[in-house]
Amino acid sequence: MNVEPRLNDIISALRGAAHRVTAAKRAVASVLVERSDHSTADEITRAVQRLRPEVSPSTVYRILEEFETLQLVVHAHVGHGATVYHLAGTVHGHLVCTNCGSTIEIPARHFDLLSGDLMKTYGFTLDRHHVAIAGLCADCAGDAATR
Ligand SMILES: [Zn+2]
Ligand SMILES: [Zn+2]
Ligand SMILES: [Zn+2]
């Protein structure tokens, strides 16, 4: 899948997999479609509760896991912070600044060379998205250099 699923795609994927379509799932799906950025489960829960105050955080977690099983959603770990989620579809990598915590989304092609080398040498398949690469962003690196 190269295109991010939209709300209707998510609903039909649920139906196709014979999963129940609940109001809570609709709410989580529409929040994910609306938020194109990387969101923590807490952020998603807060947005869902604006639509459906009765949906509990644990329900949101369960739904996110279900969506991941159906490959509608992917998660990544950026820095020491919480896991972030977004719709599946675009393959990219993440850089995270260990000083200010900002994250930068980068095209997956930056990993092509490394990915090819790791495969050739170790037979290892790189997952470009799952874990962020840590370092210093340009601003923080600049500050460190002038200190
Ligand atoms: Zn993970
Ligand atoms: Zn920084
Ligand atoms: Zn991502």
Image: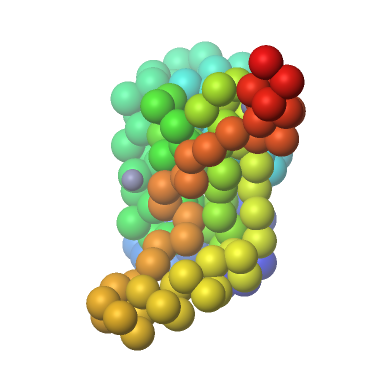
Quadrant of the image where one finds ligand 2: top right
Residue 23 position, x and y percent, is 50, 35
How far across and down, in percent of the image, does residue 15 sit? Answer: 44, 61
Q: Is residue 124 above or below residue 61?
A: below
Q: Residue furthest left?
A: 122
In x, y percent, where is residue 33? 65, 45
Q: Residue 138 is drawn in which quadrant?
A: top right
Residue in the image at 35% along x and 85% along y: 120
- Relative to 69, say whether 143 is above or below: above
**Please, is residue 111 above or below residue 95 in the view?**
below
Q: Going by the image, does 86 lie left or right of 70? A: right
Q: Quadrant of residue 102?
A: top right
Residue at coordinates 35% horizontally, 48% vertically from top-left?
A: 66
Q: Nearer the viewer, residue 121 or 33?
A: 121
Horizontal and vertical percent position of residue 47: 60, 23
Number of numbered callouts drawn:
0
Quadrant of image for the N terminus: bottom right
**Display coloring:** rainbow
- The front one of 89 and 9 is 89
Rendering quarter of residue 6: bottom right
As drawn, 72 above or below 57: below
